[in-house]
């Protein structure tokens, strides 16, 4: 009788301890998730701030002079050499003859 | 013992039955707090993804006056941390003693937030709330187009206002479980209503072309000291607005220092008589309705023509001019004679067909519709005035949109500013396409008349190397507010141009309100607006990688004494 009673008591205590352990673990995991969420929010905030900074630094109004300096299809050739002109070529050909 | 036990049990049963619900609600309120999760407003970006407007998360400080015991001490501490006046904070708190919530300072810096945290104030009396602060990384670029968001997150002007609902999103909420010391021990997932963040709006603007447009206006303003000026760059094929700039302007990051007149979005909110820029539409409609023929010649009466009781003048004495030359020389007498041939009915139809008298439908608030009076109010005076761009009023956007029809094979496109939502495909607003005149007529006007305006007409100062372009000058007289008559000193000088002539890719318009004649002695659109418009067009064409005509480039580089005999 005593053995049965104590076994049942031990069983109840063990189940309770297991439940408590599970609950603690559950709370711990929730805390970790909350912390991760918080970190994510902080990182997103930093990302937003850095994005604004990057856009400000890369704004066309700041970089337009460099952009203009890039060679483009419609830009004039730097100079047309005198030797390339048709008249100069003609004279050069005459001298060669 | 039994009596005590029974008394307690009875009291418990009584409390449970009579006040159980109230206590349960009270306990829930103490344990569970519903917190608003603010929706992040959407971004506004250009067609390449460059950010015009975005939001960053910042803190705002509040207090709970109802819980404050020593108001002066709290006010002093907060004033020191936030750089505010302690007296004012104290007065604010003292004047609202019963309130549960009172802002102290909104959108504080990280340093200020750190200093407030260091005070270690009780969460019952002071706290932070997250808010979003709008930032404009491109500064003053397209300020009137983008608009602003006020401190409560409402769109004011521009895209911020017209797409406020879409950009703002909807706040969410979540329930937090607190312990006795009000520390959050759990965020309840089951009751969470996630926020619906604002959507990103993609504009048709190109930030680089916008910079070119803004710089072109800066140059015009520096030289001509006008009341205001505006520039528009448009893709005539799609109706996409590539740049839209106004002067004066402001920096939306420092909107508090903006002048009142700088808020005006000039391309849609300035309305004036278009002057000579209206003439090509009359000619195109006259040809479409069979009233005039391209080969016809009109006698321009050597600069003076008595039309009814009204004496019309041209700036120069022209004799007989072809239809194309009437546009090239911008002859008022020639246009009046075309107007007589067409009659008021067809002139009225021409104005409406090219989109005058009604808003273009661009996605911006405050667009003016222009003004075309009802036909029954037109007189014989109108027959001479309307063909030269008087008696009607138009916004710069209406004028350039109408030129879009001439550049797009006679088809009028609704100008549009918004491409699509970044997260979804497809267009937000429908583009309305209206055929106005036959493509052969539109091409004739563009290639035979408007192209020659730049090569040998009033718009020569707009000529650019490497591209064959077309254009039209406009110099509209303004009404003198003193006399109610047309002023000799107040003008709106404008120039519309586009290129290349054969397959137009870009249209540009620059409009200058009241250039100072005394500074440079001129007020004509060909002098005030044309050089800047030509340069802006060249930069836009290069930016869009439109290939230049090599032969035009080469001829521009050859010496003045070069003749064809050199070429074998």
Image (tube, coloured by chain):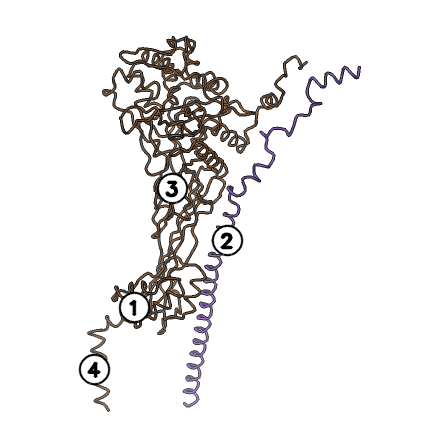
**Does dot 1 land on a helix, a strand or a loop?**
helix
Q: Spatial distance from mark 2 to mark 4, Cα to Cα?
A: 65 Å
**Dot 3 and dot 2 within a common chain:** no
Counting other residues with Cα less than 10 Å from the Cα at mark 3, is it few (<14), some (14-19), or many (20 or more)? many
* Chain of the residue displaying label 3: B
Question: Residue B502, position in %: x, y?
Answer: 50, 21
Q: Spatial distance from mark 4 to mark 3, Cα to Cα?
A: 67 Å
**Does dot 4 land on a helix, a strand or a loop?**
helix
Residue drawn at x 41%, y 46% is B252
Q: Which of the pair B219/A71 is nearer the observer?
A: B219
Tell me the residue that label 1 is attached to. Answer: B29
B353 left or right, relative to B239: left
Looking at the rendered structure, which numbered label has been put on residue B10? 4
Q: Spatial distance from mark 3 to mark 2, Cα to Cα?
A: 24 Å
| Pointers 2 and 4 in contact (C-beta within 8 Å) | no
Tell me the residue that label 2 is attached to. Answer: A50
């Amino acid at each position: 009788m005593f053995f049965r009673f104590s076994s049942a008591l031990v069983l109840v205590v063990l189940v309770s301890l297991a439940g408590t352990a599970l609950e603690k673990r559950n709370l711990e995991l929730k805390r970790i998730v909350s912390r991760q969420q918080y970190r994510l929010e902080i990182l997103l905030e930093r990302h937003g701030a850095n994005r604004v900074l990057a856009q400000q630094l890369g704004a066309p109004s700041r970089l337009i002079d460099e952009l203009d300096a890039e060679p483009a299809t419609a830009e004039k050739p730097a100079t047309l050499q005198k030797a390339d002109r048709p008249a100069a070529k003609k004279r050069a050909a005459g001298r060669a003859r | 013992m039994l009596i005590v036990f029974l008394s307690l049990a009875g009291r418990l049963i009584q409390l449970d039955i009579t006040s159980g619900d109230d206590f349960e609600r009270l306990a829930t309120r103490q344990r569970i707090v519903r917190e608003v999760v603010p929706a992040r407003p959407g971004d506004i970006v250009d067609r390449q993804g460059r950010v015009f407007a975005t939001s960053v998360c910042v803190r705002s400080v509040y207090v709970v006056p109802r819980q404050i015991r020593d108001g002066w001490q709290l006010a002093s501490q907060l004033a020191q941390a936030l750089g505010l006046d302690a007296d004012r904070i104290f007065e604010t708190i003292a004047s609202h003693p019963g309130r549960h919530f009172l802002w102290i300072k909104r959108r504080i810096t990280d340093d200020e937030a750190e200093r407030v945290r260091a005070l270690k104030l009780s969460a019952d009396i002071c706290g932070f709330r997250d808010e979003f602060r709008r930032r404009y990384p491109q500064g003053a670029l397209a300020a009137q187009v983008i608009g602003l968001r006020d401190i409560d997150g409402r769109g004011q002007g521009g895209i911020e206002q017209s797409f406020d609902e879409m950009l703002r999103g909807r706040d969410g909420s979540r329930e937090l479980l607190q312990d006795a010391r009000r520390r959050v021990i759990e965020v309840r997932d089951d009751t969470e209503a996630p926020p619906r963040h604002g959507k990103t709006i993609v504009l048709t603007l190109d930030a680089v072309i916008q910079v070119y447009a803004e710089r072109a206006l800066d140059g015009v303003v520096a030289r001509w000291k006008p009341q205001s000026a505006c520039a528009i760059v448009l893709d005539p094929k799609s109706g996409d607005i590539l740049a839209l700039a106004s002067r004066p302007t402001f920096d939306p990051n420092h909107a508090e220092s903006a002048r009142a007149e700088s808020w005006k979005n000039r391309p849609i909110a300035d309305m004036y008589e278009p002057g000579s820029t209206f003439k090509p539409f009359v000619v195109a409609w006259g040809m479409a309705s069979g009233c005039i023929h391209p080969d016809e010649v009109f006698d321009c009466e050597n600069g003076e023509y008595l039309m009814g009781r009204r004496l019309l003048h041209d700036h120069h004495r022209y004799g007989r001019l072809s239809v194309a030359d009437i546009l090239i020389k911008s002859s008022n007498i020639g246009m009046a004679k075309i107007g007589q041939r067409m009659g008021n009915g067809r002139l009225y139809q021409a104005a409406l067909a090219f989109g005058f008298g009604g808003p273009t439908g661009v996605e911006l608030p405050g667009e003016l519709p222009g003004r075309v009076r009802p036909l029954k109010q037109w007189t014989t005076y109108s027959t001479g005035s309307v063909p030269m761009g008087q008696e009607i009023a138009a916004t710069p956007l209406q004028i350039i949109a109408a030129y879009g029809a001439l550049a797009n094979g006679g088809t009028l496109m609704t100008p549009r500013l918004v491409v699509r939502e970044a997260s979804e495909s497809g267009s937000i607003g429908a583009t309305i396409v209206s055929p106005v005149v036959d493509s052969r007529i539109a091409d004739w006007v563009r290639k035979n008349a408007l192209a020659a305006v730049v090569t040998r007409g009033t718009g020569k100062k707009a000529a650019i190397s490497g591209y064959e372009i077309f254009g039209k000058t406009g110099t509209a007289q303004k009404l003198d507010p003193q006399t109610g008559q047309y002023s000799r000193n107040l003008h709106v000088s404008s120039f519309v141009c586009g290129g290349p002539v054969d397959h137009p890719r870009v249209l540009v318009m620059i409009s200058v309100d009241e250039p100072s004649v005394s500074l440079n002695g001129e007020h004509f659109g060909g002098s005030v607006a044309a050089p800047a418009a030509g340069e802006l067009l060249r930069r836009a064409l290069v930016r869009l990688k439109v290939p230049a005509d090599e032969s035009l480039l080469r001829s521009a580089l050859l010496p003045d004494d070069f003749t064809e005999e050199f070429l074998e």
